Image (tube, rainbow, N blue to C red):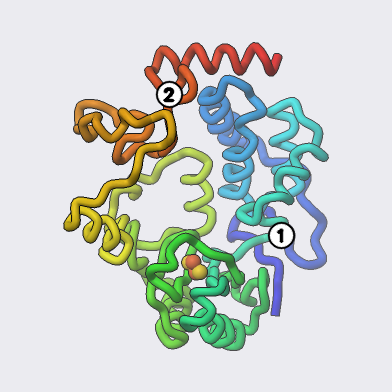
Amino acid sequence: MSVEHAPEGLSGRTPGQQHATAYDEATRARLDADAAQVIARYPQERSALLPLLHLVQSVDGYVSPRGIAFCAATLGLTTAEVSAVATFYTQYKRHPNGDYTVGVCINTLCAVMGGDAIWEELSEHLGCDHDETTEDGSITLERIECNAACDYAPVMMVNWEFFDNQTPQSAREVVDRLRAGEAVAPTRGADRVVTFTEMSRVLAGFPDGRADEGVAAGGPTLEGLRVAKGHGWTAPAFPGDEGASARPAASGDVPPRVGDEQSSAQRPVTTSGDVSPEGQQTKQASDDAKES
Ligand code: FES
């Protein structure tokens, strides 16, 4: 059964109540100070909208009407523009969320490996369908698509932390422990799962210091790399970037360049921003000029 759950001590909406339309003075002052920090990270104020939506979720437990109004007023947008963005992404919740979003991957690989059975077990056990919250407000259950963790299928996420190689029984144990208020550790990542509002604050850009806890890429993920290295296999160069494979691998002192191992930009150097920090600044200034 679905209920609309407001975090304790906050004024999110519960059934039969009107939407709160404004923050109290202390909360508003805190939001203003946090928003100023977030906005300062971007050359264009409106670029801060996504983290600000997470910020209001960290206070209200969802993107509330007053949160939309806050984002609009803070960034000089209309509430319609803010709502248009908030309704596009599934991480933004349009009604009060539970303390833990439990997402069961039902995409093809996880489904055939047991994801469908996990979904059926949890849906029945919790009395929830997709995007519904338990009556105690602890769990919001979701069907989710591939989480790029297929090597650990079937996978379940709790507030976007990985629970790998699940079974209906193990998944049920996880939700029971969460509802009992126990600290629960994901298979990879941080040492314990934090609440939805705590995670939302991290996603808004306020680290909780847990990013480097636990295993990130585990054995199955790295297996292909291990086999390739054992055989001396390397990927062919991109057209026009034949020199990339001849460059030395990135060291701790030198940031990886585009196309190098460990670079997140696995493509040929194509812009001045790919070459140096100065080039990045020049490119940013040029992009800003085109926008204004
Ligand atoms: S299909 Fe479930 S993580 Fe990819």
Q: Nearer the viewer, residue 221 or 142?
A: 221
The x and y percentages for residue 122 are 55, 82
The amino acid on which the numbered mark 1 sits, given as a three-letter code, is His
Q: Nearer the viewer, mark 1 or mark 2?
A: 2
The amino acid on which the numbered mark 2 sits, given as a three-letter code, is Asp
Q: Nearer the viewer, residue 105 or 45?
A: 105
Whichever of labels 1 and 2 marks the residue nearer the N terminus, that label is 1
The x and y percentages for residue 290 are 67, 15
Name the residue rendered at 64%, 84% in the picture.
127
**Residue 225 against residue 171 in the figure, above or below:** above
The x and y percentages for residue 276 are 37, 18
Q: Mark 2 = which residue?
A: 274
The x and y percentages for residue 37 are 51, 27
Query: In which quadrant of the rendered image does the N terminus lie?
Result: bottom right
Name the residue rendered at 46%, 17% in the picture.
272
Q: Quadrant of residue 178?
A: bottom left
Give me the disc on residue 95: 1
Dot 1 falls on a residue whose secondary structure is loop
Residue 221 in the figure: left or right of residue 290: left
Q: Is residue 10 visible?
A: no
Q: Nearer the viewer, residue 243 or 280?
A: 243
